[in-house]
Amino acid sequence: MMHQRTMREITDKGKEWYYRIRPILKKKYNEGDYVAFEVESGEYFVGKTGIAAINKAQKKYPNTQFFLAQVGSVAGLMK
């Protein structure tokens, strides 16, 4: 069974993933695009809106909480 992370753990791990790949995101995507991270794997999903990014992520990882960031800035946590 996968470890249930607290909101703080998801936020901390999500920020860690975001800053690790931020240069790649800034080159590959437009500033203002949204990125939803599945924090256990580091896999991310990009959309023009936060909802679009989360919807993509939920198709692969249903019932999971995601860390949401915006290319160029950090947004927060989404379920």
Image (tube, helix red, strand yellow):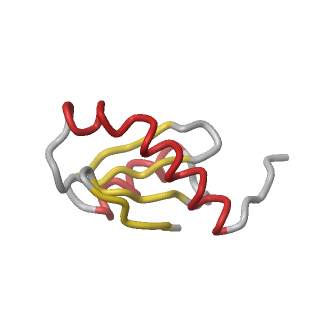
**Image coords of residue 19 (percent x, y):** 43, 43
For the image, the number of numbered tags is 0
Residue furthest right in the image: 1
Residue 52: percent from left, percent from top: 29, 57
Instruction: Residue at 77% x, 58% y: name it.
Output: 4
Residue 42, placed above or below residue 48? above
Q: Residue at x 24, y 61 (%)?
A: 49
Depth check, front residue: 30 or 57: 30
Residue at 44% x, 67% y is 76
On screen, residue 20 versus residue 31, left or right, reads: right
Q: Is residue 36 above or below residue 75?
A: above
2 left or right of 60 in image = right
Question: In terms of depth relative to the viewer, which is nearer, 14 or 4?
Answer: 14
Q: Residue furthest left?
A: 30
User: Which image quarter: residue 64?
Assistant: bottom right
Q: Position of residue 69 (x, y in %)?
A: 37, 57
| Residue displayed at 31% across by 62% down | 50
Q: Is residue 31 rendered to the left or right of residue 69? A: left
Place residue 22 in its image quadrant. Answer: top left
